[in-house]
Amino acid sequence: MGYTEMMIEGRNAVIEAYRSGKTIDKIFILDGCQDGPVMTIKREAKKHDSLIKFVPKERLDQMSQTGKHQGVIAYAAAYDYAEVEDLFKEAEDRGESPFLFLLDGIEDPHNLGAIIRTAHQAGAHGVIIPKNRAVGLTATVARTSAGALNYIKVAKVTNLSTTIEQLKKKGMWFICADMDGEIMYRLDLKGSIGLVIGSEGEGVSRLVKEKCDFRAAIPMKGKIDSLNASVAAGVLAYEIVRQRME
């Protein structure tokens, strides 16, 4: 999976970059500029975890490659997303049953990066994330993954529920984290399996949960009722690893 950085200049170009799904790391905006398009860019930047810096015109002029920055210059991180089929090819090449992570609505880039790191270390063949209502592969995600993003494939899909249905036809089983589920140590988690992890606040969405074959509960002895999403992913992933090693 490669990483490059590209410059995008001009208000409309930056807005269109966001609309097309590009991952924008940081934006430089002319200090004091508050017109409609700039306000739109600022809203998108906050929504997508982009760093905003307000700078004088002289700085933008120095940075510009075209001389037509219109008060806005953005740097977009261009990652190569994989296709779901690529994840299966990875399992085939390694002579293993597919083991995938599916992330439902993870919005914190630090959590996503940590989960990607865990997925790689646990020997998963890839990670699947949804296009909407979830963080993409930002620079923060790359940093938090501690380099794992360079070694594990990440696919982006339109609909997670539909993807699960399609993967079931390939013989996969799916387990999701659920406090009301069966204790994870009592479940048979061998074979081709997809681990579904939900958002930090709401957990796995109802529609996705209904598609899962197993609901796994992590035993907890404390007075609070949940774990951080990346921690829960690690605990469940390594129970799957333990069973796959038997």
Image (cartoon, helix red, strand yellow):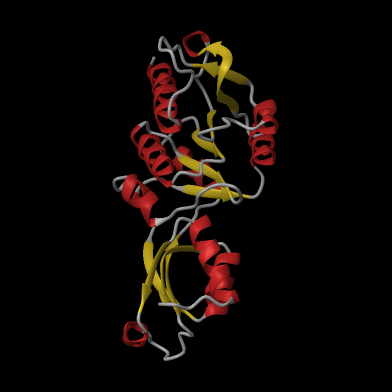
Residue 149, above or below 39: above
Q: Quadrant of residue 172?
A: top right
Residue 215, above or below 163: above
Q: Is residue 4 shown left or right of residue 23?
A: left
Residue at far left of view:
146
Quarter of the picture holding the C terminus? top left
Place of residue 212 in the rendered image (x, y in percent of width and height, measured from the top left): 64, 26
Quarter of the picture holding the N terminus? bottom left
Residue 41, above or below 175: below
**Of residues 160 and 35, the one drawn nearer to the viewer in this rendering:** 35
Task: Please give the name of the residue rendered at 58% of the width and 14% of the height, measured from the top-left corner.
Answer: 181
Q: Is residue 226 shown left or right of residue 57?
A: right
Q: Quadrant of residue 176?
A: top right
Place of residue 24 in the rendered image (x, y in percent of width and height, measured from the top left): 45, 64
Task: Please give the name of the residue rendered at 33% of the width and 34% of the height, measured from the top-left corner.
Answer: 121
Place of residue 227 in the rendered image (x, y in percent of width and height, measured from the top left): 44, 24
Residue 68, above or below 241: below
**Of residues 68 and 175, the one drawn nearer to the viewer in this rendering:** 68
**Of residues 214 and 172, the one drawn nearer to the viewer in this rendering:** 214
Q: How many marks?
A: 0
Q: Is residue 197 shown left or right of residue 115?
A: right
Place of residue 69 in the rendered image (x, y in percent of width and height, measured from the top left): 45, 85
